[in-house]
Image: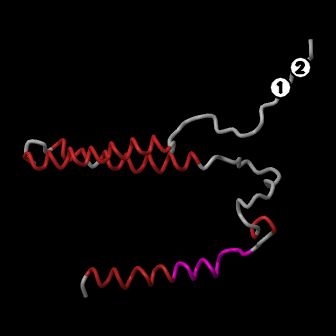
Amino acid sequence: MTNLFFLILFVPILAAILLALNVLLAPHRPDESKVSAYECGFPAIVGQTRSTFQIHFMVVALLFLIFDLEIILLFPVAVTLYQVSTYGFAIAILFFIVLTIGFVLEIGSGAIKLSNLDTRPKTNNKQQTKT
């Protein structure tokens, strides 16, 4: 029996056993807050410490992750620059140009525009008087 066959056979069986144990042993006490739809516009649960956040932060995080991983791909080229010859250097420059174009388009589309995202109207506590 090969290792790959053992892995293909063992992992699904182990996953099924663990899922079955979870269904059998986990407590099942649903209440209104557990079965209600999540993030659907209902007011927050009393005493809940979560607060709303802008989806902009998630977009920035995903874009950072993508560009960070692409920059990490340039590290092996930098380390082996003397061994990759002119062809390898040209491919690395081409990759860097495509990465730069993507970053410029990202900035141009406003995906990473950092600004005040608070959309609530500003209130002024001072009363304005006509003079």
Query: Front-most of 53 and 89?
Result: 89
Q: In what quadrant of the picture does the C terminus appear?
A: top right
Name which quarter of the figure residue 28 lies in: bottom right
Instruction: Give the magenta range.
Output: 17-28
Q: How many marks?
A: 2
How dense is the environment of label 1, judged by Cα within 10 Å: few (below 14), some, or many (20 and up)?
few
Q: Secondary structure at mark 1?
A: loop
- The residue positioned 43% from the left and 82% from the top of the image is 12
Q: Any mark on residue 124, and which?
A: 1
Amino acid at the residue labelled 1: Asn
Please tell me in which quadrant of the rendered image residue 2 appears.
bottom left
Determine whether label 2 and label 1 are within 8 Å by CB: yes
User: Where is residue 119 drawn, in percent x and y?
Assistant: 71, 40
Callout 2 secondary element: loop
Q: What label sits on residue 128 in the rendered view? A: 2
Q: Residue at x 51, y 45 (%)?
A: 111
Give percent across and percent down for residue 54. 63, 46
| Residue lying furthest bottom | 1
- Overall secondary structure of the magenta section: helix
